[in-house]
Amino acid sequence: MHAHLSLADLKKKEAEIFGGGGEHANCSTFDIIVENVRGNIEPYNYTDRNSDNNTKIEGVDKNGTQIGLQYFMYTFFHLKNHGSFYSCGTLFDVTFYFDNDTHINEILASFWLLTFLGNLGERSRRGMGGFRIIQIIDNENTKGGFEFIDNNPATIKQRIEEIETLFKRGQVSTTTYLNSYSILNKEEIYYASKDSITTWEEALNEIGLKLKNSRLDEYNHTKISSEKSAAFGLPVRHRNNFTVTPKDFTRRASPLIIKVLKLNNNTFRWLLVKFDGEFLPATKNLLSTGNQADISALADFINILNKVKI
């Protein structure tokens, strides 16, 4: 959201809020405490991935009825043997303590963006670790006009526009934006046009299946080229230990974030955030092929979605 600032101003702003070192070192202006976790930590074990007797993550049917959801959980099914996750419905409290009033609005705006456009934990860009706010205790009206409970798309669009104003984003020409990393653009946020999705599993499975199919050749169902596959995030690890990586980079996070929203009428929508910004520097090619990533695959994927712009 601050990509309109120069890199020097961006780092200065970050240090003002979160603290920084050096000659003008200062502490963070706030603290966060997560407590009172009410839920189970469930194990998963896929050492024998061809067996139906393995512990299953909720909502995943290994017989194929949730192929899109399985696709998002690729690392759990094919790259890991064991681990754990918080069960669906886990409750927890997040408490903010502010040292002063200077940056409260910016801190809460950042938390709002995480709540409505992001997730927590592993595979967070592929819909895992979604959470929502169900109650706020704010006797001093610290949060001001921020709405954390209304999940409807129209409200989300309005909040993003308010945050842009708060961050003074519109006061700088977009031609000055830093593009060497991911940039949030509200014109690239979409949600499912289908209005009858009744479970989060169905929502994730729908967009997961579309993403999986977009990475297969339309005619012979073979995987798309490494250059096109790379555009969805690097490294790309395959079960045969073949890995696609960028030269001189260990990782390039996916420019896509998938979020599931539970709306006020108890239906669900998937929400897709497609970040703008330079995917890789023009001088950086893929080690596996020597060519650059083909980002047209992202546009092809977005075009096949039954979507509405937020």
Image (tube, rainbow, N blue to C red):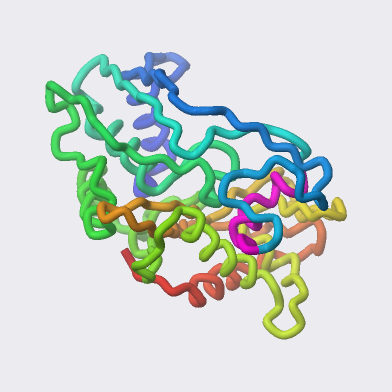
Q: Is residue 238 above or below residue 149?
A: below
Of residues 277 and 40, which is closer to you in this image?
Answer: 40
The x, y position of residue 123, in whole percent, is: 59, 45
The x, y position of residue 154, in whole percent, is: 23, 59
- Residue 137 lies left or right of residue 129; in this view the side is left
Q: Is residue 119 above or below residue 288?
A: above
Q: Residue at x 29, y 37 (%)?
A: 134
- Residue 132 lies left or right of residue 226; in this view the side is left
The x, y position of residue 246, in whole percent, is: 72, 53
- Residue 74 lies left or right of residue 51; in this view the side is left
Span colored in magenta: 65-79
The x, y position of residue 232, in whole percent, is: 61, 59
Q: Is residue 77 magenta?
A: yes
Which residue is most to the bottom? 219
Image quadrant where one finds the C terminus: bottom left
The chief SS type of the magenta part is: helix
Q: Residue at x 51, y 50 (%)?
A: 127
When asked about the image quadrant of residue 139, the answer is top left
Residue 51 showing in the rendered view = yes
The number of discs equals: 0
Q: Residue at x 39, y 18 (%)?
A: 33
Q: Is residue 67 magenta?
A: yes
Q: Is residue 210 above or below residue 90?
A: below
Which residue is most to the right? 240
Of residues 235 and 20, which is closer to you in this image?
Answer: 235
Q: Residue at x 79, y 63 (%)?
A: 290
